[in-house]
Image (cartoon, rainbow, N blue to C red):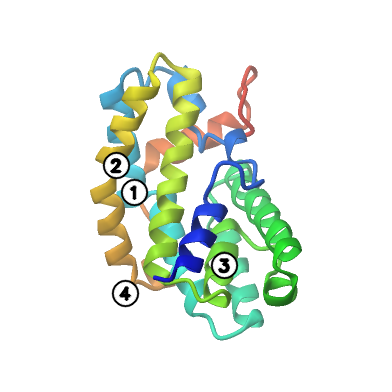
Amino acid sequence: MSAQSEHLLAAWMSPSYPVGAFAYSHGLETAISEEQITSADDLGGWLDRLLEAGGPRADAIFLTLAHTAPDFAARDALAAEVRAFAQGRERLLETDAQGTAFAATSRAVWPDRLGKALGDWPYPVAVGAAAARMGVDRDAACRLYLHGVISALIAAAVRFMPLGQTEGQRLLAARFAPIDALVEESRHLTLADVGGHAIMADLAALRHETQTTRIFRT
């Protein structure tokens, strides 16, 4: 991978890239509030399940399909599919709001390359499309995207439960291998493979929509 590609991915997946990832917990806030997650081990198991069968697995497929899509129209059609797969109003908000913010910033920073190439698409579609347009390798884009998603969820948990920064980094390091496995698997998957059975995570996300006291948007 070129130095330019490394810089792009480091910028795009940095917490300073203005997509607002800090505002979303993917239902974790509810799971912690309901004491489904009370320890680092609980959180690690929850994250593993998401990578195996939840939203991050679907996102890896969506990013891959966006990266290989032939044109804007194909990505626009994919974006509609991604929205249809969202498990509830807040999950749709989470992917749409971050994707729109990512696309807006990227179009503004690289207008010649991305100005007309990115729509206001769900997050994995926007990232996959930008990576393809800028010549960034699919595997690297998918790996850093998943790393960013898991890192943001751990950061959310650190803010909401007694979990120190060091333990958070241990949890992240332990997810490197599962992330790599998903990157490898998702190379060969299609829309027909999207789905999952991270039921507790999906239900937590739905219950969050009516949670009275909360600090996260999802």
* Chain-order first, disc 4 or disc 1: 1
For the point 61% across and 23% down, the residue is 211
Where residue 197 is drawn, which disc sits there?
Answer: none
Mark 2 or 3, which is nearer the eye? 2
Mark 1 or 3, which is nearer the eye? 1
Tell me: residue 8, above or below residue 168.
Answer: below
Q: Is residue 194 visible?
A: no
Left or right: 209 as drawn, with respect to 201 = right
For the point 26% across and 25% down, the residue is 41
Task: Give the CA separation, mark 1 to mark 3.
Answer: 20 Å
The quarter holding residue 114 reads bottom right
Three-letter amino acid code at disc 2?
Asp
Give the crowd class for mark 3: few <14, some 14-19, many >=20 residues within 10 Å.
Answer: some
Three-letter amino acid code at disc 3?
Glu
Disc 1 and disc 2 in contact, CB within 8 angstroms: yes
User: Mark 3 sits on what residue?
Assistant: 81
* Chain-order first, disc 3 or disc 4: 3
Between 31 and 6, the one nearer to me in the picture: 6
Left or right: 43 as drawn, with respect to 128 = left
User: Mark 4 sits on what residue?
Assistant: 188
Give the crowd class for mark 2: few <14, some 14-19, many >=20 residues within 10 Å.
Answer: some
Q: Secondary structure at mark 3?
A: helix
User: Mark 2 sits on what residue?
Assistant: 48
* Chain-order first, disc 2 or disc 4: 2
Three-letter amino acid code at disc 1?
Leu
Q: Is residue 56 visible?
A: yes
